[in-house]
């Protein structure tokens, strides 16, 4: 039996990348996994197949986490078909690059788009699952933060602000829900291997005028371990936080950033 056998987990943004790795890892531990996606149905179906191959039971549900009505519908369908919600992983998120000295480029549209998905989307999902978790007498919430929420990120100030928000929300949520047996923690990844970090590096290169190689080298220079992070390592941490092994851990932000050296 796996660490999560028989439990039901919702993983938002599970079509690709970190979300996919977490969904598959949960499946490997015996969980029933709701594979949430917003637009990438083909990729979400691929994730579902990987979850099934790993030994889990997948359920694919489309929902834009920035839309409260869609989030509530996703949770309602989960409860109707699977009977419970034990784990919520708020992984869905987006970023944007803005040359920070040009403050006029930090438009309302930029702020609203990031805030609606990264912060309000996290809140909407938590709000939707908490009644079921309280009724059950237990639950685990894992919110995806970022090193941007710990150190800040040049040219991505709105993104960094949303991740600071996620961290503050997570800590407060843990205080508010602990008496009901619900734990809330956050994971703060650094540079994770995959398409997203390549887009990040491309954005930095475009703004700075540096080459991709120079941007990569600068990113690695800030780490003690000179390597990208494997999404599977983040998934392993998520499994730990969702398991009974972490039953006394709540309100924490766990970095997984290859020891990023920055004050």
Image (spheres, grey):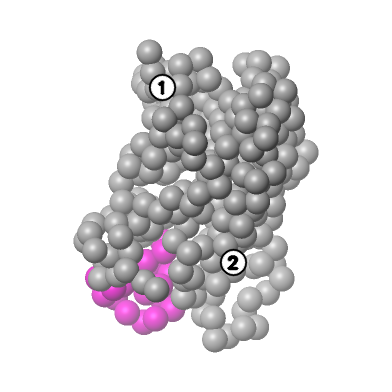
Residue placed most toward the observer, 255 or 162: 255
Counting from the top left corner in percent of width and height, residue 91 is at 53, 44
| Residue lying furthest right | 69
Vertical arrangement, residue 230 with respect to residue 58, above or below? below
Vertical arrangement, residue 110 with respect to residue 252, above or below? below
Residue range in magenta is: 199-219
Kindly identify the residue that appears in the image at 45 percent across and 29 percent down: 243
Vertical arrangement, residue 88 with respect to residue 98, above or below? above
Q: Secondary structure at mark 2?
A: helix
| Location of residue 134 by image quarter | top right
Kindly identify the residue that appears in the image at 46 percent across and 16 percent down: 5
Give the residue pinned by disc 2: 161
Residue placed most toward the observer, 232 or 47: 232
Give the residue pinned by disc 1: 3
From mark 2 to mark 1, how far is it between C-alphas? 34 Å
| Location of residue 60 by image quarter | top right
Is 58 colored magenta in this rendering? Answer: no
Say left or right for 259 vs 87: left
């Amino acid at each position: 039996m796996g660490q999560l056998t028989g439990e039901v987990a919702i993983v938002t943004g599970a079509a690709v990348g970190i979300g996919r790795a977490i969904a598959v890892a949960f499946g490997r531990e015996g969980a029933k996994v709701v594979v949430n996606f917003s637009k990438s149905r083909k990729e979400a179906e691929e994730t579902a197949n990987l979850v099934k191959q790993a030994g889990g039971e997948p359920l694919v549900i489309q929902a834009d986490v920035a839309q409260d009505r869609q989030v509530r519908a996703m949770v309602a369908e989960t409860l109707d078909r699977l009977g419970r919600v034990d784990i919520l992983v708020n992984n869905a998120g987006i970023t944007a690059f803005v040359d920070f000295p040009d403050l006029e480029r930090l438009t309302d549209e930029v702020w609203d788009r990031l805030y609606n998905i990264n912060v309000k989307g996290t809140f909407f999902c938590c709000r939707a699952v908490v009644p079921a978790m309280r009724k059950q007498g237990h639950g685990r919430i894992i919110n995806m933060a970022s090193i941007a929420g710990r150190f800040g990120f040049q040219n991505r100030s709105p993104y960094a602000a949303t991740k600071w928000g996620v961290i503050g929300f997570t800590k407060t949520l843990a205080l508010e829900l602990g008496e009901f047996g619900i734990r809330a923690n956050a994971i703060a990844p650094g540079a994770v291997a995959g398409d997203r970090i390549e887009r990040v590096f491309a954005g930095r290169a475009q703004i700075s005028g540096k080459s991709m190689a120079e941007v990569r080298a600068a990113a690695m220079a800030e780490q003690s371990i000179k390597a990208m992070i494997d999404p599977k390592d983040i998934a392993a941490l998520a499994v730990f936080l969702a398991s009974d092994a972490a039953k006394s851990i709540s309100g924490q932000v766990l970095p997984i950033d290859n020891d990023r050296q920055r004050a």
